[in-house]
Amino acid sequence: MTAVFDGASLRLARVFSGLALEDVAEMVGKTRQYLHKLETGQSMPTEILTQDLADALKVEVGFFASKANRLHEDQFHFRKLLTTKKTVKQVAIARGEMIDALIKLLDKELRLPTLKIPSVPVPHTSEEIERIAENCRMEWGLGWGPIANMSRLAENLGAVVTTFEGLSKEIDALSVAVERPFIIRNTLKESVCRQRFDIAHELGHLVMHEGIVTGDRVTENQANRFASALLLPRSMMVKLFPRPNGTRLDWKGIREFKTTWKASKAAILYRARQLELITEAQYKTGVITLKRTEGTNEKDDYLIPQEPPEMLENSLSILAKKKGITRKEIASLLHVKPEFLTELMGAEVVPEPEKVRLAVPHLRLVV
């Protein structure tokens, strides 16, 4: 019988991979009921079965030890909290736990960027949210112009941005309020403009909703308002938004405005209506036109360059180059197989040999 085995860690590995009890039971030649007993601590596996479970779940036997500081659902800022399926949330939480473990490991080896995300009292009015976003812009040295790269901004503020491959469309993005917060984008959302809005939305949660359970209509609307105000500051909207020609929207001007500010036309119209730069009738007509002619992915989205996360990839590259700590060794420190780490990091993993990119400043080795 194995010396150290925690059923909760078995469940973590299973849920991380999106597998049902039946799936894992079939892999190791056991019943669903027996796997349930292992996960709930009612039974203990033999050493042979422990190794079989580790192989099936792409982890090392040491992964099944008890884990401290487990994350809780209320630390996650889920979009659509009430309608997201429980199983989808469980997978996201399991993957979030492993991202957090990886970040903690990197924080020991590197000096990651200092956290510069303020925490403010929960706002009660739209005007308060506008001022919070404006203060953040000034505090973060953004001025009033377009934000060049939202992923880089969040990471320079000390958060980690990452992606999940194959996560359900039910989750656009989420953020996790821990010592070093992280934001997870869903790669199923192809529009860069919408990905930028998602990151701004999650920054809104981290700024305004510390210790608050989010996902309801109020907190989601607050985060949306923050994102709109951060990406499209009202002073610039008032000054530069292309006004309608009579009752007709200036679509050419809106298209040019989009490529400058890297916001979707749908978000620009919504913001213009928020600030009463267009009428309700003009807004509704614009929304109907977009849905009919362009849909969710707008025709000119291809003009906006991708903004992939950089911190995790750069961190692993620096460790490999400067300390000789390879991805394989990082995986071992997490008690997982290299392919598990690849799945954890999703699209960010690059093949060896590592190339160090210096787009994210302030990464330093701990000496």
Image (cartoon, grey):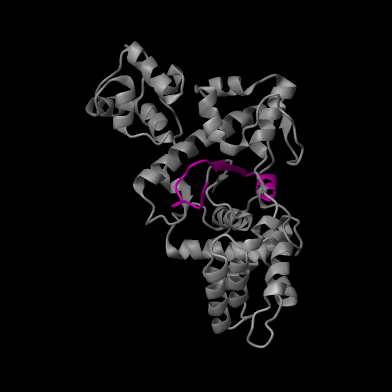
The residue shown at (50%, 53%) is 172
Q: Is residue 230 above or below residue 77?
A: below
- Can residue 77 be found in the magenta stretch? no
Q: Which residue lies furthest to the bottom in this view?
A: 246
* Quarter of the rendering occupied by the C terminus: top right
Which residues are drawn in magenta? Answer: 152-176
Left or right of 108? Residue 15 is left
**Residue 124, position in %: x, y?**
51, 69
Q: Residue furthest front?
A: 293
Which of 45 and 127 lies nearest the eye of the viewer? 45
Q: In this view, does 275 lie above or below 259?
A: below
Q: Is residue 65 visible?
A: no
Please tell me which residue lies in front, 273 or 287.
287
- The location of residue 303, given as percent across then percent down, is 70, 57
Q: In this view, does 151 lie above or below 286?
A: above
Considering only vertical position in the picture, is 62 above or below 245?
above
What residue is rendered at 68% in x and 36% in y?
112
Number of on-image labels: 0
Q: Quadrant of residue 320?
A: top right
Give the x, y percent position of residue 115.
Answer: 65, 45
Q: Can residue 18 be seen in this snapshot?
A: yes
Identify the residue at horizontal 51%, vertical 22% (top origin).
337
Q: In which quarter of the image is the N terminus?
A: top left
Residue 155: x percent and y percent? 66, 45
